[in-house]
């Protein structure tokens, strides 16, 4: 039998298809769905790890499913803001980085004060106040903190031992000395670099500037309040590169490279968030599982109270796009994720917990070797720079000048001068 | 009774209308929107505001744009011409007869089937300054190292090599097809007249391949001007923005700094420059085709 496609058959088939889609869509719509736009790490800490799928009880209670769309940080922020700029979006919840929540961006998200008042999050005051403040724009709460990434100094204990170093550094000067000593070929024949750092985030040079009491942009928008400290920080980085204790490929090194280098024993030190501990020591990936440990990043001995320097912290928050559908369900999801139990579960799965009480939990402290140090560092930590419209461009300018100084194409003094001249016009008036 | 033709509009339009709608929706309207956007100041959370030519002035007075443009022109000029020479040589070699020609064709065309992301990941590993096998081989041979993570010129050379590797199959296949279309009689006549191999190439092959060469170069110039993935994934324009190309500059303006007005202006400047670059080739092509006619 032969069949031919004519106009009537085509129209009939098209109508049947459209009907099926319409009715199918209605059937599917009977199950509630939260469309979440996030980084993969946010999905993983809610659903995988030592504590398992900690959001399952909420899904069952709400008879809802969670549809995750995950992207890397920058594309994620771009997509989220783009979605929130449309007339309507399918995404009910989006994850926002603290330094991206400017006054203009905040307009794209639903103010959460009324929801919090009507149906409050459990023990709201327990959430780290600094992180809540970062999500409060013009007195409106626009995001609920869900994760912090506080920077630590990770070290490979086995390599330190092999080089005859008994303990990790207590001052920046010791760190430099140890990093140089650890630039060697290990007994396994692996060429080891003292330290590996990514060059595409302001976090790392800011940590070195803070070790000398300096900063990049303070929360009250002061640019490099202590320029000499920034120069000293850059000089240390340049010295590390010149002595090969920082890889020559510094300018193309990314965050993931740091993880790989540490796991393979190609670097002895790196700066990463405490939450990376589990990944660095994952036996399936790391050749040094259980040997990679962390301490607070040490301050310079030349600064009084240097050991108590402020580490850089970056936080993520959950927000509801103002143009989203079913905001009630979105708030229910946010409430569940922010609860004490889920925050604790996520922390056990490798999340930086935003509740102070999580660190006080005896079980958590016992299961997480870094919990006590992290809690101590977090208490003094602050962001690398605050949110403002040209923050990303300011970070790019800063990184460009830092790279030039570290690679030896400018002196630290020239780089700092250029940062001051180029970043100042980008700051809010 | 035989139907009378209803004229061009009545008969043809329903068939070609979907294409027109698609072109209008996918190319014309977005292009008009980008023109409009290029005269606005626009970012997330703000209404677009008319700023006249400010975005064009801002981009054209930005030294980073000019550096990116210079990098782009250097890389594509080198890559397109080297691709042309290698592609031509390979086309002649294949047409002269090679053992296992089909297998070799698959090998030569393979890079075109590989996604740019995969290719860059592969090349990053091969040329890793510390553990890359190619880096090790270069050192073993005693050749100077390709210090692409540190020296900007080396970074651009590596990007150029990767571009050539990725796009050589396109140039090759056009030239190979054109070479196969050259009548054998012309070569036989040349040989009968006592022409040497060089004379056959100079007076038979080259003139017959000229239109194909022009078309391949024209397309490659236009495609290569959009060079992005190779640079973004290999060096991200670094160290310190020294290997940035125009498409990376545009990406940063649009998707990193969310400055949509200046990104739109950059896009139209790119269109204008690539048309300018192509003008010579189009003029030559027109001349070739009018001669042929």
Image (tube, coloured by chain):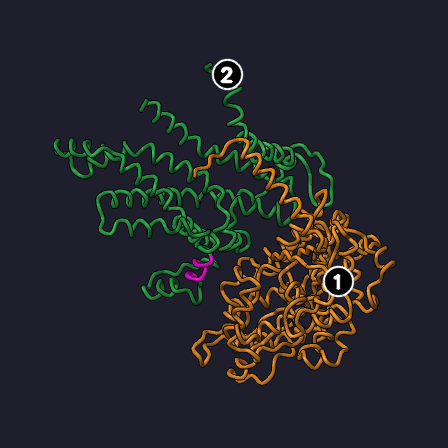
**Residue found 72% across the figure and 42% down from its top:** A87
CA gap between label 1 and label 2 equals 67 Å
Instruction: Let me know if marks 1 and 2 both belong to one chain.
Output: no
Label 2 neighbourhood size at 10 Å, few (<14), some (14-19), many (20+)? Answer: few
Is residue A429 in view from this perspective? no
User: Disc 1 marks which residue?
Assistant: A145
Q: Chain A takes which shade in the image?
A: orange
Query: Is B14 placed above or below A402 here?
Result: above
Indicate the quadrant containing the N terminus of chain A: top left, top right, bottom left or bottom right: top left
Of residues A291 and A392, the one nearer the viewer is A291
Residue B57 point in image, percent of width and height: 62, 36
Is residue A72 in view from this perspective? yes
- Which quadrant would residue A65 be assigned to in this image? bottom right
- Which quadrant would residue B131 be assigned to in this image? bottom left
Of residues A112 and A26, the one nearer the viewer is A26
For discs 1 and 2, the disc positioned in front in the rendered view = 2
Relative horizontal placement of residue A183, taking residue A89 as reference (left or right): left
Q: Are marks 1 and 2 in contact (CB under 8 Å)?
A: no
| A82 inside magenta stretch | no
Q: Chain of mark 2?
A: B
> Farthest residue toward the right?
A117
**Residue found 51% across the figure and 42% down from its top:** B69
Kindly report the secondary structure that dominates the magenta region of the rendered protein: helix
User: Disc 2 marks which residue?
Assistant: B7
Q: Chain B takes which shade in the image?
A: green
Of residues A311 and A53, the one nearer the viewer is A53
Q: Which residues are magenta?
A: B121-127
């Amino acid at each position: 039998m032969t069949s031919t496609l004519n106009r009537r058959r085509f129209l009939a088939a098209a109508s049947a298809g459209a009907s099926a889609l319409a009715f199918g869509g209605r059937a599917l719509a009977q199950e509630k769905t939260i469309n979440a736009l996030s980084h993969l790490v946010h999905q993983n800490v809610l659903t995988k790890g030592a504590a398992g799928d900690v959001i399952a009880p909420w899904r069952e209670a709400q008879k809802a499913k969670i549809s995750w769309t995950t992207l890397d940080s920058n594309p994620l922020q771009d997509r989220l803001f783009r979605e929130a700029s449309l007339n309507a979006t399918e995404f009910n919840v989006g994850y926002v980085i603290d330094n991206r929540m400017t006054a203009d961006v905040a307009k794209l998200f639903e103010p959460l004060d009324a929801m919090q008042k009507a149906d409050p999050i459990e023990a709201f005051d327990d959430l780290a106040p600094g992180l809540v403040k970062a999500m409060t724009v013009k007195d409106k709460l626009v995001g609920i903190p869900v994760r912090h990434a506080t920077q630590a100094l990770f070290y490979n204990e086995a390599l330190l031992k092999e080089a005859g170093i008994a303990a990790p550094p207590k001052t920046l000067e010791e760190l430099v000395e140890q990093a140089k000593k650890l630039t060697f070929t290990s007994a396994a024949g692996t060429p080891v670099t003292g330290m590996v750092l990514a060059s595409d985030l302001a976090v790392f040079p800011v940590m070195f500037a803070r070790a000398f009491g300096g900063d990049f942009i303070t929360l009250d928008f002061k640019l490099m309040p202590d320029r000499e400290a920034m120069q000293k920080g850059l000089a240390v980085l340049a010295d590390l590169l010149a002595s090969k204790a920082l890889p020559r490929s510094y300018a193309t090194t990314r965050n993931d490279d740091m993880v790989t280098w540490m796991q393979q024993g190609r670097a002895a030190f790196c700066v990463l968030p405490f939450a990376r501990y589990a990944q660095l020591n994952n036996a399936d990936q790391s050749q040094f599982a259980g040997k990679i440990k962390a301490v607070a990043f040490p301050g310079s001995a030349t600064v009084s109270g240097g050991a108590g320097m402020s580490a850089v912290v970056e936080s993520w928050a959950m927000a509801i796009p103002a143009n989203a559908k079913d905001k009630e369900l979105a708030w229910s999801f946010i409430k569940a994720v922010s609860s004490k139990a889920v925050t604790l579960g996520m922390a056990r799965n490798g999340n930086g917990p935003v509740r102070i009480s999580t660190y006080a939990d005896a079980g958590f402290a016992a299961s997480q070797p870094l919990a006590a140090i992290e809690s101590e560092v977090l208490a003094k930590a602050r962001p690398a720079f605050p949110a403002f419209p040209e923050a990303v461009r300011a970070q790019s300018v800063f990184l460009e000048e830092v790279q030039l100084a570290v690679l030896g194409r400018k002196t630290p003094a020239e780089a700092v001068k250029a940062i001051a001249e180029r970043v100042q016009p980008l700051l809010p008036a | 009774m035989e139907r009378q033709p209803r004229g061009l509009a009545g008969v043809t339009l329903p068939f070609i209308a979907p294409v027109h709608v698609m072109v209008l929706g996918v190319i014309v309207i977005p292009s008009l929107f980008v023109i409009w956007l290029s005269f606005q100041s626009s970012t997330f959370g703000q209404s677009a505001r008319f700023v006249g030519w400010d975005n064009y002035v801002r981009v054209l007075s930005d030294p980073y744009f000019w550096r990116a443009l210079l990098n782009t022109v250097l890389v594509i000029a080198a890559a397109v011409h080297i691709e042309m020479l290698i592609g031509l040589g390979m086309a002649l070699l294949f047409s002269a007869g090679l053992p296992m020609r089909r297998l070799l064709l698959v090998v030569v065309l393979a890079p075109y089937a590989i996604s740019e992301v995969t290719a860059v990941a592969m090349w990053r590993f091969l040329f890793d300054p510390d553990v890359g096998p190619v880096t090790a081989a270069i050192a073993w041979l005693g050749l100077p190292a390709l210090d692409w993570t540190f020296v900007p010129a080396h970074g651009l050379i590596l990007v150029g090599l990767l571009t050539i590797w990725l796009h050589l199959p396109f140039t090759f296949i056009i030239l190979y097809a054109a070479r196969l279309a050259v009548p054998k009689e012309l070569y036989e006549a040349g040989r009968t007249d006592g022409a040497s191999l060089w004379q056959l190439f100079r007076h038979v092959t080259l003139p017959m391949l000229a239109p194909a060469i022009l078309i391949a170069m024209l397309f490659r110039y236009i495609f290569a001007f959009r060079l992005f993935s190779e640079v973004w994934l290999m060096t991200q324009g670094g160290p310190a923005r020294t290997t940035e190309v125009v498409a990376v500059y545009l990406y940063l303006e649009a998707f990193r700094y969310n400055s949509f007005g200046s990104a739109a202006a950059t896009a139209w400047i790119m269109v204008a420059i690539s048309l300018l670059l192509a003008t010579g080739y189009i003029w030559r092509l027109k001349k070739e085709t009018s001669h042929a006619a």
